[in-house]
Amino acid sequence: MKQIILFGSLFLVLSYTQGQNLNNQVTFDFYMGAGLSKLDDRIVDTYSLIEPTYRIGALIGGGVYFGCFGVNLEIGGFSINDNDSFMQLNTSGNYESTTFGWHATPSIGGKYKVKKFDFILNVGYALASAQRSITDCIDCRTEKVSINNGATIRPKVVYHLPKKYFFTSYEHYSSNHMQSLILVGFGYRTNR
């Protein structure tokens, strides 16, 4: 943990020194991505999920950068492999439940530019919730699957084309329910 704090502090100092040359240029950002993360064995056992359990999801996000410092918000959904799904009979037939959830992550961070690349480090707080349910069924039962994500740190590498970019990132969670998240995606930025 000390290494992460040291690395983060050094990165923010580099971002700040580079940001002095950008005259507080404001940049708007919109992106989409897909990712894969592993759930901790304790939550897998509690809810009888299939091992190893991966959270597969998609997200949209946006942010605004003031020079090299930014504020971001990501919102997304994810699906979880479920070993303990339930069946329920309704007027249309017998259906099996699926486990689906959502997450939102507000974050702040800095970026450092090198030619066509941006190196970004964001810290934030992830909120998530999931439930077992039957899709398109109003009166069917649901079961909550509690996922506590907590604080996050995410290094991100961005490769720029004119007005567009591609990225990959790794997100580390402080919570014991989520182990890590690997994302790939693309986005649009008003200016660089």
Image (cartoon, rainbow, N blue to C red):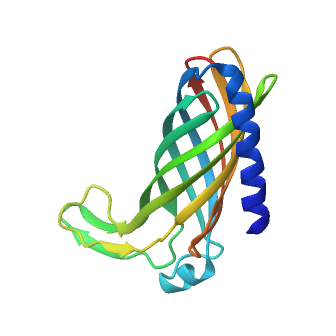
Residue 7 in picture, x, y percent from top left: 78, 54
| Residue at the image position 49 percent from the left and 85 percent from the top | 46
Residue 101 in picture, x, y percent from top left: 42, 60
Q: Quadrant of the N terminus?
A: bottom right
Tell me if residue 30 comes above or below residue 78 in the rendering.
above
Of the pair 192 and 78, the residue shown nearer to us = 192
In the rendered image, which quarter is residue 17 located in? top right
Residue 119 in picture, x, y percent from top left: 74, 38
| Residue at the image position 25 percent from the left and 73 percent from the top | 141
Tell me if residue 111 comes above or below residue 127 in the rendering.
above
Tell me if residue 84 comes above or below residue 110 in the rendering.
below
State the count of labels.
0
In the rendered image, which quarter is residue 67 located in? top right
Q: Quadrant of the C terminus?
A: top right
User: Is residue 50 in view?
Assistant: yes
| Residue at the image position 63 percent from the left and 21 percent from the top | 164
Of the pair 87 and 45, the residue shown nearer to us = 45
User: Is residue 97 in view?
Assistant: no
